[in-house]
Image (cartoon, helix red, strand yellow):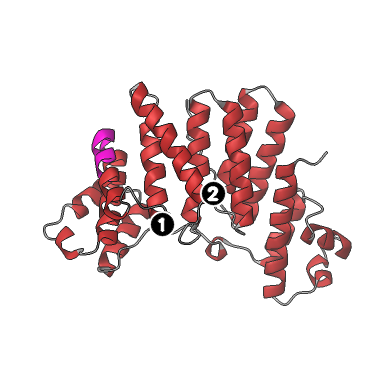
Amino acid sequence: MVTESEQTMAELLGQRITTERKQQLLSQQQLASGICAQSMISSLEKGRYIPNAVLLAKICTKLHISMDRIMLSHYPEVNALASFNVTIKALCDQHDYAGMLTYLATDGLVNQLFTDQDLQIYYYYRAVATEQALHATQDSLRDLHLAYQYTHPTQKTLMTPTEILILASIAFLETKPTQPVATIESGWTHFKLALTAIEQQPVTQYDENLNSLYYLFALRLHQAHADSKAITTIDQGVEWITNHHSHYMLVDLFFLLAQLYTANQQSPEAQRALNQSQTLSTIFKTIPYRDLER
């Protein structure tokens, strides 16, 4: 029996193959030539069939799907200073968070940022670098709260993607297992507020970075031994992401789902989820985040 998540993945892969084939002006018969029957390509594109790894690899090779063709999430940017965006992106790509802290402390840098939105992004990156380089969670949380308050007064209801990203980051740090009970409870509340903001209330615009919210929430639920809720959150995330015609974070969500099923001794479900993660990883050339230690 095909599960809902398997059907979702089949449809996503079908859409991806169809888009790539049409962009390259190939007919289904031309794509199938030397690989499989045309009817197989038709079934794949209609989301009726999930290909095995060998077939998928042959299709990817013929379509020349490579890493530089894959859409990635982007880094929030300031409007006032192009050099800031270039530097931050380079430091993030290198995972050089100590270097990021040094750069953000450059004399006069913050004085070149004038709008609340730009200052919000500055303090967001300082919070990220502080946590990653120094593991100073309380200092990081202080900067995240400051960043959030720059553009989100208490009476505001409509949230921007950056505000939701910051709120999710606050929730993730507050729910670290080492935090006090009251702080952890605050974190769960912030996670739920962020989910409500994107599922039940209008967001100013869709942003792929929002996809990460489901992964962060599910991971923390797993670490809190709330695996049933974590699985539900992953299912919601898969639906949200595919409804927005995205694939960002799907590999990670299915990989985490496999870990959840394994932890609960549900081997067949775990293997299906792992296969889904590996299949998506093959076609989208992404590697799942594997730091799932409790």
Based on the displayed image, in which of its 4 quarters is residue 272 positioned?
A: top right
Image spot of residue 10 (x, y percent)? 74, 52
Q: Dot 1: few (<14), some (14–19), or many (≥20) neighbours within 10 Å? A: some
Residue 40 left/right relative to 241: right
Which residue sits furthest left?
107
Residue 224 is covered by the magenta coloring: no
Residue 35 appears in the figure: no
Looking at the rendering, the stretch of residues picked out in magenta corresponds to 134-143
Residue at which label 1 appears: 160
**Label 1 amino acid?**
Thr
Residue 139 is covered by the magenta coloring: yes
Residue at the spot 70% in from the left edge and 61% down from the top edge: 15
Image spot of residue 279 (x, y percent)? 67, 48
**Label 2 amino acid?**
Gln
Residue at the spot 28% in from the left edge and 49% down from the top edge: 149
Q: Dot 2: few (<14), some (14–19), or many (≥20) neighbours within 10 Å? A: few
Task: From the image, give the main secondary structure of the stretch colored magenta.
Answer: helix
Judging depth in this view, the residue of 281 and 227 nearest the camera is 227
What secondary structure is marked by label 1? loop
